[in-house]
Image (tube, rainbow, N blue to C red):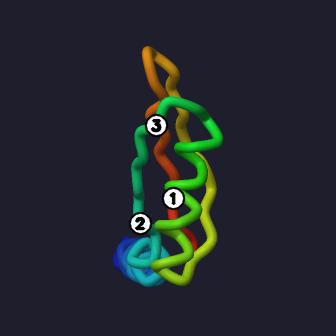
Amino acid sequence: MKSIKIFASVIALSALPFASFAQSVTACASTLDGAEAQIAAQAHKAGASYKVTEANFNNGVHMTAELIK
């Protein structure tokens, strides 16, 4: 039982450094291209790449992305 707790703790702590690099950013624009351009600019400024996680169009575009270093 003690070894299971230690193993679970090691796994949880080993994932911690990877989580610290992820950053979520958002952008709003009138088009998908405009919102993605804003996301790309934010990623470039942070020196990271990005992955779009959500885009919503409702009288404008709201886009969320995760920056990946």
Q: Which mark is residue 66?
A: 1
Label 3: element kind: strand
Q: Nearer the viewer, mark 3 or mark 2?
A: 3
- Which amino acid type corresponds to the residue marked 1 in the rendered image? Glu
State the separation of the CA atoms marked 3 and 2.
Answer: 20 Å
- Which amino acid type corresponds to the residue marked 3 in the rendered image? Ala
- Pick whichever of labels 3 and 1 is earlier in the sequence: 3
Residue 58: image location, x then y, percent: 45, 16
Residue 62: image location, x then y, percent: 44, 34
The reply to whether the C-beta atoms of the residues labelled 3 and 1 are less than 8 Å apart is no
Q: Residues within 10 Å of mark 1 (few under 14, many from 20)?
A: many
In the rendered image, the vertical position of residue 59 relative to residue 44, given as above or below: above
Q: Looking at the image, how many numbered discs can be counted on the residues?
A: 3
In depth, the one of 27 and 66 nearer the eye is 27
In depth, the one of 18 and 42 nearer the eye is 42
Query: Taking 13 as reference, is 36 left or right?
Result: right
- Which amino acid type corresponds to the residue marked 2 in the rendered image? Gln
Residue 48: image location, x then y, percent: 57, 77
The quadrant holding residue 55 is: top right
Q: Which mark is residue 29?
A: 3
Q: Which mark is residue 23?
A: 2
In the rendered image, the vertical position of residue 3 relative to residue 33, given as above or below: below
Q: Which mark is residue 57?
A: none
Label 1: element kind: strand
The reply to whether the C-beta atoms of the residues labelled 1 and 2 are less than 8 Å apart is yes
Q: Is residue 8 visible?
A: yes
Image quarter (top left, top right, bottom left or bottom right) of the C terminus: bottom right
Q: Is residue 3 visible?
A: no
Residue at (51% x, 58% y) in the render: 66
